Amino acid sequence: MDTTPLGVPRPQTRPMPAPAPKVTVTRVAAARSRELTTAAARRVRAASRADGAGESGLTQLLWVNALHMAGDAMIAVSLAGTLFFAATTDAQRGNVALYLLVTMAPFALLAPVIGPALDRLQRGRRWALAVSLGGRAVLALVMARHFDDLWLYPAALGVLVLSKAHNVLRAAVVPRVLPGAMSLTSANARLSVFGLVTAGVAGGLGAGVAALIGFDWELWATAAVFLAGAVLTVRLPRHVDVPAGEEPADVLSTTEIPVPGRRRRVTPHVVLALRANAALRGLGGFLTIFAAFLVQATFADGWSATLALGALAAAAGLGSFTGTAVGSRLHSAAPDRLVLHAASAAAVVTVLAAVFYGFGMAVLVAGVSAVANALGKVSLDAIIQREVPESLRASAFARSETVLQLAWVAGGALGIALPPTGWIGFTVAAALLVLAVGLILWSLYRSRPAPGTTGAPDAPTTPVGPSWS
């Protein structure tokens, strides 16, 4: 005990408490931001695991798909900067045309091979998904080293082919991780919503990184995103690799000609819905390429061109998100009618844009086309779930996804072939879209049973759901 010289104990002094940190607007804002971020993260995690998704493995696939779409968005940013905006107007058209030729044409040739190969790949799809992501990580590094020379094109080819193969594989895997309390429509809608949000965020961050420190660093970050997705893919549940008696399906023909050992055909409902979706996906590919050239030809000032592209991208992104969210909640709507109405609405607004062309109409077409694409895809998922037996469902999803990817390629090629004149582009697009919808309606008219009959003698015994009419 401490004492004075006279032996009197000294009074104990307590240490002064540290002054409380001064409350400032910045500190309050930072604390509130942390609270909101934490709450948002909890809600996102809860949403990803809802309805049994956490137990079935759908949650893990959801985040794999989110990283896949984030990486693709960052690849798109790098290609836009190296192939499009970094060149003169004439060179831009040549660069993008060369990019489509080098990347899309081989995939179009490989598409008939990919489907049968995936039908045989009943086991090991978890590792095939991981290879598609890991391969794109390696190719992103190659693009980082060669983003200003011709080696960029074969690397971009590999990235695109692996991306399309990933989409097809994912479509085949979804039924294997589907919770019992969830429909395929809801599962695919949830995958799309999470993927769109992640792609939007990643695309914005990638553009910022490219603007600040260069496209090579942006591609390094892209490789890291793909690598993280590959690691997460390996951790998918083992039952992803269990085929459970799956069989190959034919989604292109409406006539039933049974041949032993060949793919089994699905009902006309699936085929016609796929054709309507292919028309919508082709319009999406056309708008993606044509609108970019249209902006370059219409707006001379760089800032106004940036705002115009931003308006188109915002309309397309908001339309995709809205269509997916609305479509996943239309449980009482007949998907057959919905997909036809979506294609018809897109055709009508495209015709209006051709007649009353203005850049505002182009933005409107981008938004309506995105909504129609999302509604059409949700409807197609519902029709496949309703019409296709479980043993054929994974193959039907994989093959339909391949057809839709090729339709986007055809639309993009059309966008390059046409001159960047608004009324010309939208007139051609409207004519083709009206023709496609007309052919679908004609097919429906021809397939109607004659008065006094109940249908064709060889009609499928499985329930076909609501009528198209």
Image (cartoon, rainbow, N blue to C red):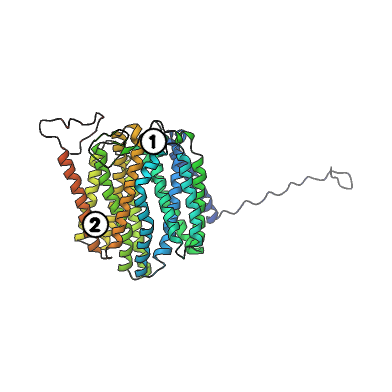
Residue 175 — which label?
A: 1
Within 10 angstroms of label 1, few (less than 14), some, or many (20 or more) residues?
A: many
Q: Residue at x 19, y 47 (%)?
A: 439
Image quadrant assignment for residue 255: top left
Tell me residue 304's x, y (percent).
Answer: 35, 67
Residue 94 visible to an observer of this rendering: yes
Mark 2 vs mark 1, CA separation in Å = 35 Å
Residue 58, compared with residue 148, is above or below; it is: above
Residue 237, compared with residue 366, is above or below; it is: above
Residue under label 2: 429
Q: Is residue 424 left or right of residue 169?
A: left
Residue 419 — which label?
A: none
Dot 2 or dot 1: first in sequence order is 1
The residue under label 1 is which amino acid type? Pro
Residue 170, compared with residue 145, is above or below; it is: above
Image quadrant assignment for residue 103: bottom left
The residue under label 2 is which amino acid type? Ala
Q: Residue at x 74, y 46 (%)?
A: 14
Q: Which of these two is toward me, 155 or 217?
A: 155
Q: Is residue 395 left or right of residue 28?
A: left
Helix, strand or loop at disc 1? helix
Q: Residue at x 43, y 64 (%)?
A: 82
Helix, strand or loop at disc 2? helix
